[in-house]
Each structure stands twice: as C-alpha cells, then as structure tokens.
Amino acid sequence: MSRTSFVIMYAGCPVLCQSKLQTEISLFTAEAEYIALSSAMREVIPFMDLLEELAKVFPLHMPCPEVHCQVFEDNQSCISIAKSYKFSPRTKHIALKYHHFRKFVQDGRLVLKSIGTAE
C-alpha cells in the first residue's frame, strides 16, 4: 500500500494538509505518485475555483487576474503522464478517474514542476 500526502499552500501559508493510505494497490511507483497527484488535485481545483469567484466578488487590482497553481512533484514519470495528451500502452491500466485534472495542466492553469525527493 502506498501513502498519499500533500500540503496545499496559499500565500506561503498551509491551507490544507492530508496524509492517508491509498485504497488501491499500484503496479508501479509512477502510478502511485499519479494517484497521489490526482488526490491532491481533487482539493486544489475547487480551491482555485473559489479564488476565482472571490476575485469576481471582491475585485482586486492584480497584474494577473487568472488563477493558476504550481504543483511540485518528485517523480518525472508522473509528470510526463500528467502532461501527455494521449494514453500510452504502459499507462492505459490507470483508471480514468485519476485523469480528471489533465485538461487543467494542458490549459496552463496547473503547472507541474519537478522537485527533488529530499526537498
């Protein structure tokens, strides 16, 4: 069993943190990381939508009105799966329920960045 854990930060402050065991057994490390990334995105995307709604209600004069999010991931394979436009034979076994955030990555609203495991 793999463990999913993440911290969502806004303006340098932690907003949400979570750590839990994954309910499915992953065949590869990249799959476990991708499931963890998908779990984090299920929390991040509604938070981004909330920020967009707040910006409409409380107009702030910001240079960039578009809300986007930087996501740090330590697994290169996971990043390439998320950025891919199509499914490959090696990743087609990953359930479709985990791919819900790919459109946000392709639109540039979610920016995936590589980070070292120790960081």
Image: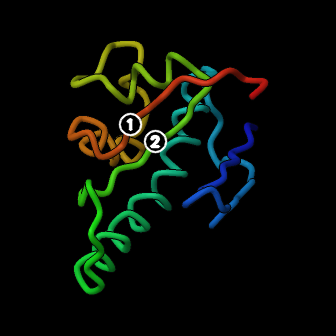
User: The disc labelled 2 sits on which kind of residue?
Assistant: Gln
**10 Å neighbourhood of mark 2: few (<14), some, or many (≥20)?**
few
Task: Compare residues 85 and 44 and report the one nearer the observer.
Answer: 44
| Alpha carbon distance from label 2 to label 1 | 5 Å
Residue 59: % across, % down? 25, 79
Q: Quadrant of the C terminus?
A: top right
The residue identified by callout 2 is 70
Lateral position of residue 51 relative to residue 34, left or right: left
User: The disc labelled 1 sits on which kind of residue?
Assistant: Val
Placement of 28 over or under 17, stated as above or below = above
Residue 117: % across, % down? 72, 23
**10 Å neighbourhood of mark 1: few (<14), some, or many (≥20)?**
some
Task: Compare residues 95 and 35 and report the one nearer the observer.
Answer: 35
Which label belongs to residue 18? none
Residue 17: % across, % down? 69, 60
Q: Residue at x 50, y 40 (%)?
A: 71
- Classify mark 2: helix, strand or loop: strand
Q: Residue at x 60, y 20 (%)?
A: 28
Q: Residue furthest bottom?
A: 57
Q: Quadrant of the N terminus?
A: top right
Residue 72: % across, % down? 55, 35
Lateral position of residue 94 relative to residue 40, left or right: left
The residue identified by callout 1 is 111
Q: Residue at x 34, y 46 (%)?
A: 101
The disc, 2 or 1, on the residue closer to the chain's N-terminal end is: 2
Lateral position of residue 7 relative to residue 48, left or right: right
**For residue 67, which quarter of the picture?**
bottom left
Q: Residue at x 54, y 23 (%)?
A: 114
Are dots 2 and 1 in contact, CB under 8 Å?
yes
